[in-house]
Image: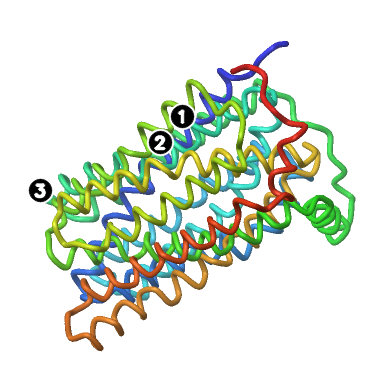
């Protein structure tokens, strides 16, 4: 059978570049806001504004991905998301970059980026065979890890010789490279015929039917919303936790060391994939991730922070790969866009609460214990780790989840 894996690699390369650029901006703005406000809540607010459009627009973006050219939607999403970053850069040059302008710029960028995710996931299904899904999942995790692995190290170094404006300029340049990669792939693959006249609500209803048709898929999506809640709490509070004791350069090195755990696992999965036992490996990986989150916040020793951060990120690609495979192989290709849009909306409900509450909880805990925002962040991180272990443990005996892989075991490994 003819393979399009090389075309996928080109598409993936564009998203890798985009991830690195976005990571530079995310890191730079995080440090800038924390140094300006001294509050974890301020950092959480910026993250929330960047996340909300993806959350709210994911469903209509998924419907569009099934009705129009998916690669064209990716180009529009990647290209026009640069507008928000340009707005922040101009505000900084004019000396007007307070918390509100930064949130507005992040919001604008995220609105266009919301078009990207369902189309990207559906395109992977379009161009690859089922036997290649697991390998692709490992590489997708690797691209996602670049914003934590490569970007912090580069950003931490650049912030010692320049300021956040340089990071924004680099990010803007990466948008053009990403669009070019997608355009090349689009020109070499014909778009699948779609019914553009189908009513929006009918498209949405069909996507919902596909998700609820198999109990295991629905259970997995609901459980995912709890998982994103606990992981979101960790992700938003890790930076203020470290910055309360160390500088931006140390934070950059620490994030790179931690994220290298994802690099190791993602590379292995990109080469070998996973043979079987997706549901069991998913639960075990999430339980281990919860344990590592707990010990990440247990000590302010930077060596221990890096060790447990490394282990946490090493567990993520396994969980993501298993979750992606179990869902992808149980949803027809022609409705994957709207299905991923709905799945993203439900599963990411946890991030909404995490980004909205974790910063406030960390600040409040720090005040109540009179230990400051750093210690408050650590306590909330540890609490999130315990809850993640409990939820993952409940997944182990769920037959509805185990049943999803019965008829979809890859044969290439």
Q: Report the front residue among 240 and 118.
A: 240
Q: On the image, which quarter does residue 190 sit in?
A: top right
Q: Nearer the viewer, mark 1 or mark 3?
A: 1
For the residues labelled 1 and 3, say whether their Cβ atoms are less than 8 Å apart: no
Q: Residue furthest bottom?
A: 368
**Which quarter shows the N terminus?**
top right
Q: Which of marks 2 and 3 is nearer the N terminus?
A: 2
Question: Residue at 33% across / 76% down in the picture?
Answer: 41
What number is the disc on residue 161?
3
Instruction: Report the residue marked by disc 2.
Output: 17
Q: On the image, which quarter does residue 235 sit in?
A: bottom left
Q: How far apart are marks 2 and 3 (CA)?
A: 23 Å
Secondary structure of the residue carrying tag 2 is helix
Q: Distance between the residues labelled 1 and 3?
A: 28 Å
Q: Distance between the residues labelled 2 and 1?
A: 6 Å
Q: Quick one: label 1, few (<14), some, or many (20+) residues within 10 Å?
A: some
Secondary structure of the residue carrying tag 1 is helix
Residue 32 image point, x, y percent = 23, 64
Q: Quick one: label 3, few (<14), some, or many (20+) residues within 10 Å?
A: few
Question: Residue at 30% across / 48% down in the picture?
Answer: 24
From the viewer's perspective, tell me whether residue 171 is left or right of residue 216: left
Instruction: Report the residue marked by disc 1.
Output: 13
Question: Residue at 50% across / 58% down in the picture?
Answer: 110
Residue 38 image point, x, y percent = 21, 75
Residue 412 image point, x, y percent = 63, 17
Q: Report the front residue among 201 and 125.
A: 125
Looking at the image, can residue 61 be seen?
no
């Amino acid at each position: 059978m003819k393979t399009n894996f090389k075309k996928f690699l080109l598409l993936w390369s564009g998203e890798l570049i985009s991830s690195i650029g976005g990571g530079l901006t995310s890191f730079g703005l995080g440090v800038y806001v924390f140094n300006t406000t001294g509050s974890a809540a301020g950092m959480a607010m910026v993250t929330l504004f960047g996340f909300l459009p993806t959350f709210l627009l994911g469903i209509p973006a998924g419907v569009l991905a099934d009705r129009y050219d998916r690669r064209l939607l990716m180009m529009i999403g990647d290209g026009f998301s640069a507008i928000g970053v340009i707005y922040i850069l101009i505000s900084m040059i004019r000396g007007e970059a307070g918390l509100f302008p930064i949130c507005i710029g992040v919001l604008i960028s995220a609105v266009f980026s919301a078009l990207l995710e369902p189309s990207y996931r559906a395109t992977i299904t379009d161009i690859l065979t089922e036997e290649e899904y697991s390998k692709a999942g490992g590489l997708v995790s690797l691209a996602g890890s670049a914003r934590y692995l490569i970007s912090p190290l580069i950003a931490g170094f650049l912030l010692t010789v320049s300021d956040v404006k340089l990071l924004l300029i680099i990010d803007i340049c990466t948008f053009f490279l990403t669009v070019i990669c997608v355009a090349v792939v689009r020109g070499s693959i014909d778009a699948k015929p779609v019914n553009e006249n189908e009513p929006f609500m009918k498209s949405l209803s069909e996507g919902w039917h596909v998700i609820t048709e198999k109990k295991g898929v629905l259970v997995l999506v609901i459980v995912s919303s709890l998982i994103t809640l606990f992981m979101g709490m960790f992700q938003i509070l890790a930076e203020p936790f470290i910055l309360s004791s160390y500088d931006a350069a140390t934070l950059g090195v620490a994030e790179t060391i931690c994220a290298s755990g994802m690099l190791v696992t993602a590379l292995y999965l990109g080469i070998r994939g996973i043979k079987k036992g997706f549901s069991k490996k998913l639960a075990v990986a999430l339980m281990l991730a919860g344990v590592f989150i707990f010990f990440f916040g247990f000590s302010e020793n930077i060596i221990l922070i890096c060790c447990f951060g490394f282990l946490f990120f090493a567990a993520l690609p396994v969980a993501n790969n298993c979750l992606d495979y179990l869902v992808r192989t149980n949803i027809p290709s022609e409705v994957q866009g709207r299905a991923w849009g709905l799945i993203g909306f439900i599963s990411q409900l946890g991030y909404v609460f995490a980004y909205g509450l974790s910063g406030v909880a960390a600040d409040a805990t720090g005040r109540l214990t009179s230990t400051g925002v750093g210690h408050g962040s650590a306590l909330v991180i540890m609490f999130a780790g315990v809850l993640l272990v409990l939820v993952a443990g409940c997944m182990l005996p769920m037959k509805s989840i185990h049943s999803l892989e019965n008829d979809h075991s890859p044969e290439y490994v």
